[in-house]
């Protein structure tokens, strides 16, 4: 702001930030991406809006998981499409596989949207699973969209990017999670070359450009000193996960798989309740514990699951366990 960088930017974002992201992909994943294929967007939500507007015609559908991030299907509904929800459970690690997608592919399906690591489950799609999904979409003349906004927040091994496999998928990402820039409202979209021109036209008409100040601020996210801080934060999140997970299991919550990434534990509550909304409301009002009911993420097994977020401090998590122990221990 002191330099006067307060005017509109290019619709696709300032060149410096697009170049910084291209360098980031080369460093982190070993893939070369032309900066022109990277669109800077107002949060990952802006990227979702662009993809929905580009790919969906009225009546089209896109496969996505149930449970999953609810806003995905809402963006499709906005452009008169539909999210075609595929029920997935613990046996699938709450992820969409190519076999599941093939079973649910319909006449109006134009592709699949997946998240890895996923919200609410924290589960990751392996490289072969991503490759199989992409092959299925290609065989059906469809598109694959991968939400990678929790990349950088995986705890046992890095999550593979679809961009390591193909340059024909659409990738959504954000500065809000690993980079911690939630209030700056800045995300990005990596698109196939053929889609770039139309995406730029959509961006010009839908939001002109992103916050110029936020874009210049985001350049600091790639400095070595910043990355050291961010990697330390990731280690702290891993420490919180590794504390909370066994405690929840000890108390009777059903969590068959260790969540590999993101910031959440998706836990079964069948031992305690068959109504997740009522269960969460009671914990909030009677015990001051805020967790999220499965109903917020879909309908499949939603009344039997809740989401814990370990985004708060270790001291707060220890207090949560103490209160849960008094209730269920």
Image (cartoon, helix red, strand yellow):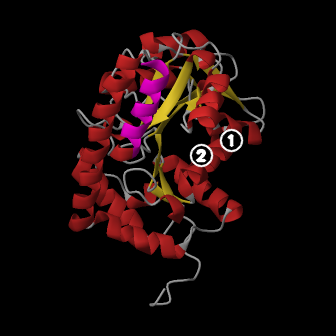
Q: Specify the segment rendered in magenta.
A: 316-329
Residue at left offset 47%, top offset 19%: 328
The residue indicated by pointer 1 is: 75
Q: Is residue 49 left or right of residue 131?
A: right
Kindly indicate the quadrant of the structure image that contains residue 105: top right
Q: Residue 158: horizontal and vertical position, in percent?
A: 26, 37
Q: Is residue 29 left or right of residue 266?
A: left
Q: Nearer the viewer, residue 328 or 54?
A: 328
Say whether marks 2 and 1 touch (CB < 8 Å). yes
In the picture shown, does residue 322 fall above or below 312?
above
What's the CA distance linking mark 2 and mark 1?
A: 7 Å
Q: Dot 2 lies on which element?
A: helix
The residue indicated by pointer 2 is: 48
Q: Residue 151: horizontal and vertical position, in percent?
A: 36, 43
Q: Main secondary structure of the magenta part?
A: helix
Q: Dot 1 lies on which element?
A: helix
In the picture shown, does residue 32 fall above or below 241?
below
């Amino acid at each position: 702001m002191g330099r006067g960088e307060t005017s509109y930017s290019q619709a696709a974002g300032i060149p410096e930030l697009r170049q910084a992201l291209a360098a980031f992909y080369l460093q982190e994943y070993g893939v070369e991406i032309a900066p022109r294929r990277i669109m800077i967007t107002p949060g990952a939500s802006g990227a979702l809006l662009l993809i929905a507007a580009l790919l969906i015609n009225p009546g089209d559908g896109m496969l996505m998981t149930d449970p999953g991030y609810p806003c995905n299907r809402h963006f499709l509904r906005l452009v008169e499409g539909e999210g075609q929800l595929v029920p997935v459970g613990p046996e699938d690690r709450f992820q969409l596989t190519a076999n599941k997608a093939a079973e649910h592919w319909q006449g109006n399906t134009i592709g699949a949207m997946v998240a890895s690591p996923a919200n609410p489950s924290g589960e990751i799609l392996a490289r072969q699973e991503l490759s199989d999904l992409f092959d299925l979409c290609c065989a059906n003349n469809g598109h694959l969209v991968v939400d990678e906004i929790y990349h950088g927040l995986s705890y046992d091994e890095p999550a593979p990017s679809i961009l390591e496999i193909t340059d024909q998928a659409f990738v959504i990402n954000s500065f809000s999670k690993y980079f911690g820039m939630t209030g700056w409202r800045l995300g990005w979209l990596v698109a196939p070359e053929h889609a770039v021109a139309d995406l730029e036209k959509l961006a010009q008409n839908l939001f002109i450009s992103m916050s110029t100040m936020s874009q210049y601020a985001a350049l600091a996210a790639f400095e070595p000193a910043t990355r050291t801080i961010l990697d330390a934060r990731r280690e702290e999140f891993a420490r919180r996960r590794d504390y909370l997970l066994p405690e929840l299991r000890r108390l009777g919550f059903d969590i068959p798989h260790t969540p590999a990434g993101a910031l959440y534990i998706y836990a079964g509550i069948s031992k305690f309740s068959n109504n997740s909304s009522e269960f969460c409301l009671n914990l909030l009002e009677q015990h001051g514990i805020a967790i999220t009911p499965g109903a917020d993420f879909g309908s499949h097994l939603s009344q039997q699951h809740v989401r814990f977020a370990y985004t708060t401090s270790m001291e707060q998590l220890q207090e949560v366990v103490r209160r849960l122990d008094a209730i269920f221990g």
